[in-house]
Image (cartoon, rainbow, N blue to C red):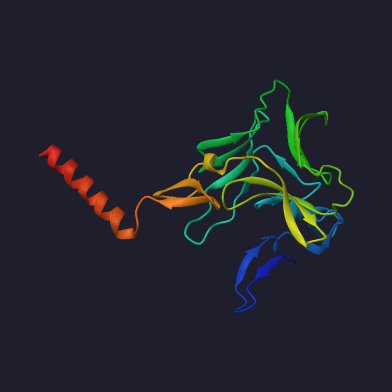
């Protein structure tokens, strides 16, 4: 019986598992498209990484209705940004599943099958007849020099298409959903605002230290209690 696991090299602690140890898995295979599959004795795929989404889509991977990409967590808080494919076929970026701060704008009467990201740098929405009904693409669309791409929702809540620049050996942004980062809900976290200075975008805190906002909150509580008495 096989289960794929990821462990911490320092102490061997399991940080991720496919949870397939009781499903009769016989082998694991990494397909040419990057999909890791676990196969049983009859050759049936029992588990695949393409259906176990995290924060990223690679070319050939789809996002179906009810599936979600979730941004990586920061050091101070768990992730609260997600990228979803709604039943209407509209793609959206959400904060805590309640605040929509970006949408593809697609609302169709046709039945939408899924959203797919391809090797040319295109994110497209397809109907049940496999016709593309909405799309957006990287600025280096079909550039033959680009061999690697991925689509990812980042810690800052923005959705981006990345292309590998082999010359400088780094990932570059070819497209992002939200052009003005200020419009990403809660972009700077609690008790802060998003702004710009001479060096670019910055986060300005409303309070200089953690004790200051506690004092403000205490004063507000005293005012409320005084009003009730």
**118 or 19, which is in the foreground?**
118
Q: Is residue 214 above or below residue 86?
A: below
- Check the picture and name the quadrant holding the C terminus: top left
Q: Which residue is drawn at 21% across and 46% down?
A: 221
Q: In this view, does 138 lie above or below 162?
A: above
**35 or 215, which is in the foreground?**
215
Residue pushed farthest left?
229
The x, y position of residue 44, in whole percent, is: 83, 53
Q: In this view, does 123 lie above or below 31?
A: above
The x, y position of residue 76, in whole percent, is: 47, 60
- Check the picture and name the quadrant holding the N terminus: bottom right
Label total for image: 0
Residue 53 appearing in the image: no
Residue pushed farthest front?
198
Left or right: 40 in relation to 216: right
Left or right: 220 in relation to 103: left
Q: Which residue is drawn at 62% across and 40% down?
A: 179
The x, y position of residue 208, in whole percent, is: 35, 57
Residue pushed farthest bottom?
10
Q: Quadrant of residue 102?
A: top right
Q: Residue at x 65, y 53 (%)?
A: 54
Left or right: 193 in relation to 220: right
The x, y position of residue 180, in whole percent, is: 58, 40
**18 or 136, which is in the foreground?**
136
Residue pushed farthest top?
109
Residue 7 appearing in the image: yes
Q: Which residue is drawn at 54% across and 42% down?
A: 184
């Amino acid at each position: 019986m096989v289960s794929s696991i990821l462990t911490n090299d320092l102490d061997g602690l399991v940080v991720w598992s496919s949870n397939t140890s009781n499903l009769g898995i016989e082998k694991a295979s990494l397909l040419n498209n990057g999909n890791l599959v676990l196969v049983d004795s009859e050759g049936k795929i029992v588990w695949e990484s393409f259906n176990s989404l995290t924060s990223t889509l690679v070319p050939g991977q789809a996002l179906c209705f009810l599936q979600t990409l979730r941004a990586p967590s920061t050091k101070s808080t768990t992730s609260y940004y997600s990228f979803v494919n709604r039943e209407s076929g509209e793609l959206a970026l959400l904060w805590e599943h309640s605040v929509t701060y970006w949408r593809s704008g697609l609302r169709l009467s046709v039945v939408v099958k899924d959203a797919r990201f391809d090797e040319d740098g295109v994110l497209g929405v397809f109907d049940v007849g496999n016709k593309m009904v909405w799309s957006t693409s990287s600025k280096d669309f079909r550039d033959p020099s680009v061999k690697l791409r991925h689509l990812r929702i980042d810690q800052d809540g923005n959705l981006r298409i990345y292309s590998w620049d082999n010359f400088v050996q780094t990932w570059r942004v070819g497209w992002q959903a939200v052009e003005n980062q200020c419009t990403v809900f809660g972009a700077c976290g609690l008790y802060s605002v998003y702004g710009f200075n001479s060096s670019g975008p910055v986060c300005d805190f409303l309070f200089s230290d953690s004790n200051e906002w506690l004092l403000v909150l205490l004063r507000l509580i005293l005012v409320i209690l005084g009003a009730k008495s």
